[in-house]
Image: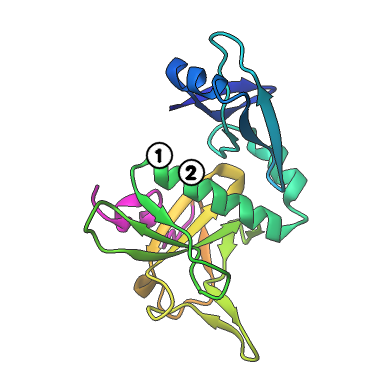
């Protein structure tokens, strides 16, 4: 199985394609199933049936590196929860493509979205992903806080996570910041597509090595 880019409308999508041997094995089992994410907010199960000779099928995954960013952002900017889920899915795909191991904590009680490690035996890091498309004073803003039961919002600390990942959705830019570097900052502002007098966090843009050496 391999990951390839397939043209789709005005953009493209990442598709997992099975080899001829895998297709043949699937045919022998009467039916094969695949799933396709047509919309970041829905997951549709489809039946591939008996595949024809040499056909290619698999799981089509929305990739923010390939789709028309403005189109999806305009559709989801009124639903921050769903937009955040897109950033989480995009991080999972990006991290796996770069060779990192990724695990998702069971349930929603933990303060982190993912557990990430660079290679076998390496340190496991707790990662929280924050998506943003909100412009504030010409920058995209993320608040390094989380909600608590009965205590309002609190800043993330080393007790909660190891790395804060900010995803600037309209331009698909990633910032990977060790949580101890964030300190007591109430908000983080990113300038991936404009010049700023004080680009405090730009040094962390695409800094994937923060997650470990592969």
Image x and y of residue 37, in percent: 66, 38
Q: Nearer the viewer, residue 149 or 105?
A: 105
Residue at 26%, 63% in the rendered image: 123
Quadrant containing the N terminus is top left
Would you say residue 213 sits in the magenta stretch?
yes
Q: Examine the residues drawn in magenta and state their main secondary structure.
A: loop
Image x and y of residue 32, in percent: 60, 28
Residue with the mark numbered 2: 93
Q: Nearer the viewer, residue 38 or 166?
A: 38
Would you say residue 143 sits in the magenta stretch?
no
Image x and y of residue 115, in percent: 40, 62
Residue at 39%, 81% in the rendered image: 159
Residue 55 located left or right of residue 18: right
Graded by Cα atoms within 10 Å as few (under 14), some (14 to 19) or many (20 or more), the crowding at tag 1 reads: few
Query: Circle 2 — which element?
Result: helix
Q: How many labels does the image show?
A: 2
Q: In this view, does 194 lie above or below 25?
A: below
- Answer whether labels 2 and 1 touch (C-beta < 8 Å): yes
Image x and y of residue 10, in percent: 68, 23
Q: Can residue 133 be seen here?
A: no
Residue with the mark numbered 1: 97
Q: Which of 121 and 154 is in front in this view?
A: 121
Magenta part of the protein: which range? 196-214
Most distant residue in the top direction: 53
Residue at 62%, 45% in the rendered image: 170
Most distant residue in the bottom direction: 150
Query: Circle 1 — which element?
Result: helix
Residue at 44%, 55% in the rendered image: 175
- Give me the disc on residue 6: none
Q: Can residue 4 be seen here?
A: yes
Residue 121 located left or right of residue 47: left
């Amino acid at each position: 199985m391999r990951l390839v880019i397939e043209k789709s409308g005005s953009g493209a999508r990442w598709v997992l394609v099975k080899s001829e041997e895998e297709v043949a094995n699937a045919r022998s089992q009467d039916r094969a199933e695949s799933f396709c994410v047509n919309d970041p907010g829905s997951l549709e199960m489809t039946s591939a049936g008996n595949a024809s000779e040499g056909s290619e099928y698999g799981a089509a995954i929305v990739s923010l590196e390939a789709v028309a960013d403005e189109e999806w952002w305009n559709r989801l900017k009124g639903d921050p929860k769903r937009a955040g889920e897109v950033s989480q899915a995009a991080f999972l795909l990006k991290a796996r493509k770069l060779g990192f191991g990724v695990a998702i904590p069971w349930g929603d009680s933990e303060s982190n979205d993912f557990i990430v490690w660079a290679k076998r035996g390496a340190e496991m890091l707790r990662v929280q992903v924050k998506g943003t498309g909100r412009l504030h004073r010409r920058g995209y803003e993320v608040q390094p806080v989380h909600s608590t039961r009965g205590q309002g919002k609190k800043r993330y600390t080393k007790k909660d996570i190891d790395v804060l990942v900010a995803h600037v959705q309209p331009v698909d830019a990633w910032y990977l910041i060790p949580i101890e570097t964030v300190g007591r900052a109430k908000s983080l502002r990113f300038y991936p597509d404009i010049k700023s007098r004080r680009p405090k966090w730009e040094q962390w843009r695409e800094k994937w090595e923060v997650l470990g050496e592969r």
